[in-house]
Amino acid sequence: MKVVLENLTKQYQSRNIKGQTVTAVNNFNFEIPDGQLIGLLGPSGCGKSTTLNLISGLETPTSGRIFFGDRDVTSLPPEERGVGLVFQNYALYPHLTVEENIIFPLQNLKGAQKMTKEAMHAKAMEVAHLVQIEPYMHRKPREMSGGQQQRVAIARALVKIPQVLLLDEPLSNLDARLRLQTREELRRIQRETGVTTIFVTHDQEEAMSISDLIVVMKAGELQQIDKPQNTYDDPANLFVAQFLGTPQINTFEARIQDGRVFIGDEAVLEVSGQKDRPVWATVRPEGFIHTENGALTCRLDRVEVMGRDVSVVSTHPAMTGRNIRTIIAAEEAPDITGETVRFNLKPGKVFLFEKDSEERIRL
């Protein structure tokens, strides 16, 4: 099911200032293709969960419209939208067994949709097989691990065959290893069912690893929509560049002068045709080439061995953060000694942004 958000806005009354409103989602426009998994990504408070609640019907938009396919669902209650919801805290009924939790949404069906006990049991077993929890159908939630409980919550959301599956930070309560396993399961389940899925997270690694498209948000506004790798390789603005990537992209105060980019007094990149002006120059950690006669000179702090790769930590007066982090091959580590370290920059890993607007400068 295709989902379209058209000029979607949600405002709340300010709790602190009478008569003033707070905008949680601001004039949101995007289309979610049928059968894809979309990651809603951004820092805490950017409006991700509010957007999800608007799509589900738990919140009413201040303005704008929501379409499922060609159907305008803006004014429909949640139960009439055909959505499945999975929350961060699982929200399972502790006194019911796994099977009873899964069946619960089916028990509320009426009229032609009403199902027999046998049909409900068969449907529960079908989704339990999909999420691989068949052996636990007679357990109570407290007798299961966090990852197993999350699978029960997903099964309960899927049992009614929703048109759209909505996941609100479903992995936040899991430990690191279990998060990795569960996100792989989420992707498998989504592919097998083909249901359009919207996945809210502040964890960029989660969003990039399982999403067909990611939607990057900031302060209620859309920043960029693209495939995960494209967003990483071609950020639309400084916020997107800084938000995506671990370690974070390195940001320098720089200037364009005479067709070259200068960081401090050193020319590090050719940019013919660009007018002279101050800019932000950002370099991905993997965008540095360690070489004795490199264009950029930094003060060496330390070298951190990470196995296959090595992280070189250094400083520079033009760097906006505390440290510069560069990722190089481990075999180069023995050559890095002394007070300074020098690098050339890979042009494809360097992005320039306007100083004031922070919009991308296309080279």
Image: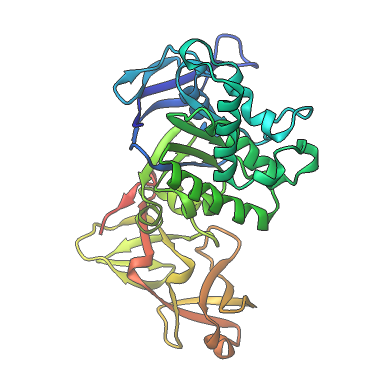
The percent coordinates of residue 356 (x first, y second) are: 39, 44
In this rendered view, identify the residue nearer to me: 275 or 323.
Answer: 323
The answer, for residue 207, to whether it is visible in the render is: no
Instruction: Find residue 11 and report its horizontal and vertical position in percent.
Output: 50, 18
Q: Nearer the viewer, residue 120 or 118?
A: 118
**Quadrant position of the N terminus in the picture:** top left
Q: Is residue 2 above or below residue 356?
A: above
**Closest to the observer, 344 or 287:** 287
Figure quadrant of residue 127: top right
Colouring convention used in this rendered image of the protein: rainbow
Instruction: Say if 99 sits above or below 309 in the image.
Output: above
Q: Is 18 above or below relative to 99?
A: above
Q: What residue do we see at 55% from left, 30% from top?
A: 85
Residue 7 appearing in the image: yes
Residue 363's spot in the image, x, y percent?
25, 59
Is residue 197 shown left or right of residue 126?
A: left
The spot of residue 34 in percent (x, y) is 34, 36
Q: Vertically, is 294 above or below 69?
A: below
Q: Nearer the viewer, residue 104 or 335?
A: 104
Instruction: Report whether 211 appears left or right of 179.
Output: left
Tell me which corner region of the image, top left, top right, bottom left or bottom right, holds residue 293. bottom left
Q: How many marks?
A: 0
**What's the residue at 48%, 22% (across, down)?**
54
Q: Residue at x 55, y 90 (%)?
A: 335
Return the residue found at the far bottom.
Answer: 335
Taking the image as shown, residue 322 lies to the left or right of residue 77, namely right
Is residue 315 left or right of 220 when viewed as pictured?
right
